[in-house]
């Protein structure tokens, strides 16, 4: 008689929803205990891990496909800022007891669309239950030509402070999702744009190779521009000075500031931008900006690094703005 | 005036408790957004991720140092079974609101002791808060000579079913931690031994090279011997037959069976063994067993693989035992 192998609920879940995302041969179709990769010749590996928790980093009732996308994209954003191209990702996820198959279907569909779009297949992972909120931990691996990872430390006095895209949309989007009535004056399209920027950030993969060629230092902006700039300047042993008049703003953020100037603080410190912050030598900036524009990613120089330490932010009337912490911290 | 960089609570926590564990130069002292590794020449990379959640995989009131050790060891156990030697690990951890510094100190001390003992430095990670239970997700990376990862699929009819160490101690240890009164007849030392086996499993790193040399297939036993054997047999396209009389048991497990024969089911299906399960060709087994013994890890042949499918378990009186699921599944 004996026992035949009956697939468990966990097996079925992996087979149905996650195996289709495991297109890399090293993932062994998720049927082994580990992934096996031949490292790319002439390259270094870049590894990053981010955990996102329901009602801390996203809302449990956000559309499930956007949660899958955000979980991957916050990691891809780190790879891009380090000059790395994705190899693959591992997913560890703990589901609350009441999770529905429909939810997992939408989550894995969103994640899978992005695994394909960003050429970052699922390599392995772990699924488990939790009595707490949904928690998603993704470890992403990328590659850079040997010795070419763009570090956070490296900004030099004279380098320009450069950012990609527009700043503050994620923080304003969070306010919209939370139902901030002061933003109700924005158009429906603007509100929708801001929500999408919060829920589905745009990792700037197109900048990876350009950062390797032009940047002295870079990181992605996840915890707020001013605080993240302070981190980059600090580990580089430099100061930084930026002007809010030079901040690249979306049309929606611009209008929001018209209605309430106080949103400037959210824009500068709110986080969830997932744009690139880079130190680019002034003489290289024109070439960098031109190449970035051609790659479809607008960039803007918003200030410069200098000797000493600390970050100075000049406000709309050239007054120095004061900040406390400057960036989000969980502790 | 401007803003000087004030370390956040998160920065201080990482600096104080986790930076000492990041001895690998590629970890960049945890001061960057990602780790950067030069892959070892002539080797493949082996990647595994496991998430453990309080009151699902361990108890929130387990000693904090043992939680740190278990989180790493369950991943190291996967690497060992794949024939891989550790390179390093990434830690994503979400702390409940009320976590105390003393707890984090003990957790990071336990984790750090094992990072050092198993030569698996911390490469990076993420710390966050959660409204739910403590959740720890570790991704471990190892290396094997190119093409030498020991797969789960590969067992051939005629291979012996081989396990390391003793089976069932983790499952019995879980019963002890839960206060199973039927086990109170065991000695204090036996109870302590079983609890330790549950809380601090022993990853069989010493077997990694031997498995590469001798095994056709291997995995670690985390979800119960019978179920995990069924998985290995299934992906190998083989059947398996084991005899419980050949099971290597600890003195404590042996005595527990004397008091209550019903514990045999726990021993066979309970999980948390973190021993190696391997398919070893019969002619290689003597050399494997001798080398394993010299390396300090006893191994035992408990049956063999055959053609067809399914797992047969012969009980103490040579009767076939019947099982349902055979292994733990979260879903």
Image (cartoon, coloured by chain):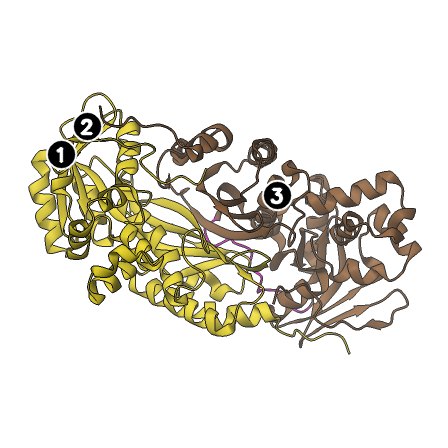
Chain colours: A brown, B yellow
Q: Quadrant of the N terminus of chain B?
A: bottom right
At a point 85% along the width and 38% down the height, the residue shown is A189
Q: Name the residue under label 2.
A: B156
Q: Nearer the viewer, residue A162 or A105?
A: A105
Label annotation for residue A166: none
Q: Secondary structure beneath disc 2?
A: loop
Q: Which chain carries label 2?
A: B
Count the labels in the image. Answer: 3
Are there few (<14), some (14-19), or many (20+) residues within 10 Å of tag 3? many
- Residue B151 visible in rendering: no
Q: Mark 3 lies on which chain?
A: A
Q: Which tag is nearer the camera, tag 3 or tag 2?
A: 2
Place of residue B215 in the rendered image (x, y in percent of width and height, measured from the top left):
19, 38
Place of residue A123 in the rendered image (x, y in percent of width and height, measured from the top left):
44, 39
Q: Mark 3 points at which residue?
A: A205
Queried whether the magenta region covers residue A73, the answer comes back as no
Label annotation for residue B281: 1
Q: Which of marks 1 and 2 is nearer the N terminus?
A: 2
């Amino acid at each position: 008689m004996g026992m035949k192998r009956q697939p468990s609920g966990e097996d079925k879940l992996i087979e149905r929803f996650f195996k289709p995302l495991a297109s890399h041969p090293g993932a062994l179709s998720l049927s082994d205990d580990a992934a096996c990769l031949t490292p790319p010749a002439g390259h270094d590996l870049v590894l990053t891990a981010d955990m996102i928790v329901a009602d801390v980093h996203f809302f449990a009732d956000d559309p499930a496909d956007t949660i899958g996308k955000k979980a991957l994209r916050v990691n891809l954003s780190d790879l891009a800022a380090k000059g790395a191209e994705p190899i693959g990702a591992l997913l560890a996820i703990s589901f609350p007891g009441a999770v529905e198959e429909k939810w997992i279907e939408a989550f894995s569909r969103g994640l899978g669309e992005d695994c394909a779009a960003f050429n970052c297949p699922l390599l392995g992972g772990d699924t488990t239950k939790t009595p707490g909120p949904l928690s998603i931990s993704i470890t992403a691996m990328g590659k850079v030509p040997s010795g070419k990872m763009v570090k956070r430390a490296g900004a030099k006095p004279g380098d320009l402070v450069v950012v990609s895209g527009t700043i503050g949309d994620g923080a304003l989007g969070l306010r919209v999702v939370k139902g901030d009535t002061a933003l109700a004056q924005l158009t429906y399209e603007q509100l929708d744009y801001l929500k999408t920027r919060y829920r589905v950030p745009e990792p700037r993969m197109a900048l990876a190779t350009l950062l390797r060629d032009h940047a002295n230092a870079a990181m992605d902006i996840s915890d707020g521009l001013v605080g993240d700039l302070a981190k980059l300047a600090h580990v580089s042993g430099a100061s930084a000075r930026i002007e809010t008049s030079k901040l690249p703003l979306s049309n929606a953020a611009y209008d929001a500031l018209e209605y309430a100037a106080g949103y400037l603080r959210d824009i500068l410190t709110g986080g969830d931008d997932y744009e690139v912050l880079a130190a680019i030598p002034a003489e290289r900036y024109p070439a960098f900006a031109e190449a970035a524009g051609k790659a479809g990613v607008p960039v803007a120089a918003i200030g410069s690094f200098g000797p000493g330490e600390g970050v100075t932010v000049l406000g709309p009337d050239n007054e120095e703005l004061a900040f406390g912490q400057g960036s989000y911290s969980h502790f």
